Image: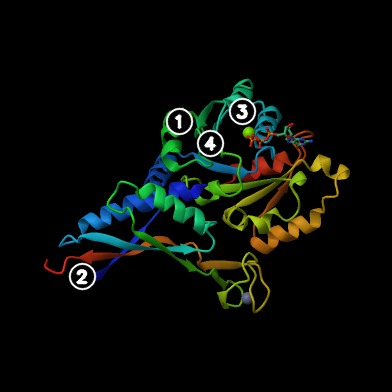
Amino acid sequence: MHEFSICTNIVESVIAEYEKIEPGPVRLLKVRVVVGKLHQIVPETLLSAYEVLTKGTIAENSQMEIEFVDVCCQCNKCLWEGEIDYPFFICKECGSGDIALIHGKELYLKNLEVEYDETG
Amino acid sequence: MKNQMIKVYKDLMGQNSLWAEKIRLILKESKVTMINLIGSPGCGKTSLLEKMTTLFPGKRDFAVLEGDVETTHDAERLNALGVPVSQLLTSGACHLEAKMVYHALIDLPLPSLKLVIVENVGNLVCPAEFDIGEHAKVAVLSVTEGEDKPVKYPLLFREAKAVVLTKIDLIPHLSFNKDACLNYIKQVNGTVPVFEISSLSGDGVHSLVEWIYSL
Ligand SMILES: Nc1nc2c(ncn2[C@@H]2O[C@H](COP(=O)(O)OP(=O)(O)OP(=O)(O)O)[C@@H](O)[C@H]2O)c(=O)[nH]1
Ligand SMILES: [Mg+2]
Ligand SMILES: [Zn+2]
């Protein structure tokens, strides 16, 4: 259930970032979050956490969209680079297990979609 | 009405990372190593700490931070052996976060310590997600849990700087296939050292302790 702790950070960040936007929009429509597949995040749990935790805030009724990033590595032996057969951290070229992560641990807020009043 | 996309790119572990950074600073200043023990409920984390204490009765340079959802049982077990220990109760949360660890850490007698071992809340998933400023996460897996846990919970085994396979004294009574388990560990983390131990007999505890003190 770490989705709730992570979502607390998401909601705090969303509100802080929304309030920084100049000129101020009328509404927050959508937030896009990028999650590396190495994080064991259950999307449904994260989405329902978002719904619960945004209640009564400016983010209430906004949509969260989760963008997943595949797990990619570079081989320390032959320098092969690419997506692995997660969860097997094995080089697809030479079979070495000595490989370094390049993608898959991302966890960040990418953008906010906001609505402006046409007259504004 | 017009909609607009506002670019943000903000790290979502921000708050936790700040506390973790503070912890790293304190550890560095006081020259203390911190280990984060992570494993399922009942995999033998506290038993290992007890055995460490009784096998090295002279060693009084380490303290323990016990993370549990409820009860102070584990802290009492270690306190009974004379280990400086603080209990961190998460009251429901399935993992320790850096802020809580920070406050417990600064209450320890750091100048007299070389090592702090954090026993995280029994759980293979959530604790692996949270950096608490440790030098090494150590994955603890008991032979009664099945061989395939490393590939079922890859993040922990990937992040771990060492894997401890516990309760090896029970292997003769089980259908546990150790080679298969070691192979799964290797498939997730090809270079990680594995320590096979029994907290009942004390087998393997020496080399684990040696490794920890060499960090
Ligand atoms: N046979 C055998 N039993 C063990 C060993 N290590 C632990 N146990 C038993 O496993 C049970 C759980 O051990 P604990 O050390 O309390 O496990 P833990 O990981 O600290 O558990 P939580 O803190 O509740 O997550 C106890 O009954 C121990 O006696 C071992 O090496 N061999
Ligand atoms: Mg315990
Ligand atoms: Zn390779």
The secondary element bearing badge 1 is classed as helix
How far, Cα to Cα, is label 1 from label 4?
Answer: 12 Å
Contact flag, marks 2 and 3 (Cβ < 8 Å): no
Left or right of A58 in this view: B37: right
Cα gap from disc 3 to disc 1, whole angstroms: 24 Å
Q: Which residue is mark 1?
A: B111
Q: Residue furthest left?
A: A119
Whether residues under marks 2 and 1 lie with C-beta atoms below 8 angstroms apart, the answer is no
Q: Which mark is residue B1?
A: 2
Q: Between residues B175 and B135, which one lies in front from this camera angle?
A: B175
How did the renderer colour the structure? rainbow
Instruction: Using the numbered discs, state the Cα–Cα distance from disc 2 to disc 3 in whole angstroms.
Output: 59 Å
Parent chain of label 1: B
Helix, strand or loop under label 2:
loop
Quick check: do tags 3 and 1 share a chain? yes
Query: Gap between marks 2 and 1, in whole Å?
Result: 62 Å
Which quadrant, please, contains the N terminus of chain B? bottom left
- Chain name for mark 4: B
Query: In the image, what residue type sits under mark 4?
Result: Val
Q: Residues within 10 Å of mark 2 (few under 14, many from 20)?
A: few
Q: Nearer the viewer, mark 2 or mark 1?
A: 2
Spatial CA span between label 3 and label 4: 16 Å
* Upstream in sequence: badge 1 or badge 4: 1
- Quarter of the image for residue A61 reads bottom left
Does label 4 or label 2 sit earlier along the sequence? 2
Q: Position of residue A95 (x, y in %)?
A: 68, 74
- Sequence-first disc among 3 and 4: 3
Percent x, y for residue A48? 45, 52
* Circle 1 residues within 10 Å: few <14, some 14–19, many ≥20: few
* The label number, if any, that marks residue B116 in the structure image: 4
